Amino acid sequence: MEERTRAYLRGRFRDHYRRSELTPPPYPQSREWGYIPWSSGPTTMVRHQSLLELGEIGDFLRRERPRHVYFSAGRYDDPGADDMDAKGWRDSDLVFDIDADHLTGVDPQRDSYGEMLAEGKGEVLNLVALLEDDFGFSDLTVVFSGGRGYHVHVRDEDVRDLNRDERREIVDYIRADGIELDAIQRTEMGGTATRRVLKKDGGWGRRVHRELLSLADELLELDDEDALDRLKEFDRIGDGRAKTILGAVSEDYEKLESGNIERGGPGIRQLAKVMTRKVVEEQSAAIDEPVTTDLRRLIRLPGSLHGGTGLEVTRIPRDEIEAFDPLSDPVPATFEGNEVAIEVTDPGPVELNDETFRLPDGDVSVPEYVAVFLMARGRAEKGRE
């Protein structure tokens, strides 16, 4: 990045902070702060800062107009101490990170920026459902990172003093590591015989049980031929097993409702296995383990600008996650309404603010939010005056 480009971005970031009001996280004085300046050399983070050193966060941002800004998930007695052990750890938020370009099925070389972020949003919806429904957490903050993905901060009192191993157990649950049918069923005595029963009172067993009942309700709405065809769509369920399953659903729905997967023999158990895989694939969330288990992690400040895109690190209200558009909603108003001359060095399409721009090599004039995006990503330089 050339110096005139850095100078331009520094200035416009400052202009953004001059017109913005940021809400810091709870207990900001107890957190470590860090930032990356617009330097010409190697990228270097300035960290081990407290608000005693930085001053009021809005004043700091307007004064330093940093490229990236972070605060710690942890809270400390002395957050500005240079040595981590000297900080005096108190507790930490439970933080989750979803990187869209790391998701299974996403190919950064093939998929557009918008397509990747859309996949990431699906993972966020799964994550929030797991945190609320399965863990009962209520103090959640969902954030678009301004770059490749999303963060979720949990600040319920009961989670803040969890250690690394306890947080890793939560990660394993959310990613459904090791969840197979054997893990979500138990064996009960029924008269003189044993029977296998889903653990339907909570967790992944409840989720699989709900999916099985949903399918059973669907089958009962169909005629027999269509119901058999529907069952034969599943792995290793042929005509014989399909008939056995349909008979069990039709004649002993109450047993399936109770969690009993013995009635219907191998067919119903195979269906339960298939449903388990389906639920795990569709309802788990691909979170980044090191972020959640790191008690001292620094995470992006909501309301700040991402120095790699010029987009705002955006809080997303719980009931607006599905409607959130990561290519429009985080575009700062500061960068709207102006055209800027740039020199494109990496041509190609850009999707932002409900528009698609197909940019050639060389000098062009584009909306400023597109210019900032391209310059921040290293795809353009500021045009010469």
Image (cartoon, rainbow, N blue to C red):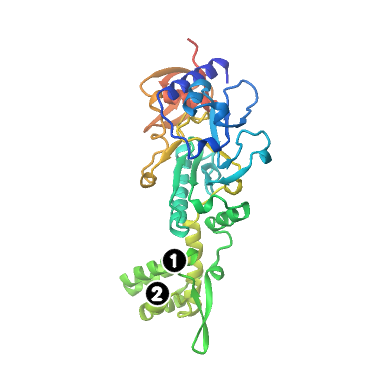
Query: Does residue 7 appear anywhere in the picture?
Result: yes
Q: Position of residue 147 (x, y in %)?
A: 50, 35
Residue reaching furthest top? Answer: 385
| Neighbour tally class for label 1: few under 14, some 14-19, many 20 plus, Cα within 10 Å | few
The residue labelled by disc 2 is: 257
Query: 219 left or right of 76?
Result: left
The residue labelled by disc 1 is: 233
Amino acid on which disc 2 is placed: Glu
Q: Position of residue 322 (x, y in %)?
A: 38, 46
Residue at 46 percent of width and 23 percent of height: 371
Amino acid on which disc 1 is placed: Glu
Which is in the foreground here, disc 2 or disc 1? Answer: 2
Q: Is residue 125 above or below residue 27?
A: below
Residue at 57 percent of width and 46 percent of height: 91
Residue 257: image quadrant is bottom left
Residue 216: image tag: none
Residue at 62 percent of width and 20 percent of height: 40
Which of 197/371 is in front? 197
Residue at 57 percent of width and 59 percent of height: 177
Residue 3: image quadrant is top right
**For the N terminus, which image quadrant?**
top right
| Neighbour tally class for label 2: few under 14, some 14-19, many 20 plus, Cα within 10 Å | some
Q: Is residue 294 above or below residue 187?
A: above
**Closer to the N terminus: mark 2 or mark 1?**
1
Q: Secondary structure at mark 1?
A: loop
Q: Is residue 270 above or below residue 104?
A: below
How many dots with numbers? Answer: 2
Label 2 – label 1 distance at C-alpha: 22 Å
Which of 113/328 is in front? 328
Q: Position of residue 256 (x, y in %)?
A: 42, 75
Which of 230/13 is in front? 13
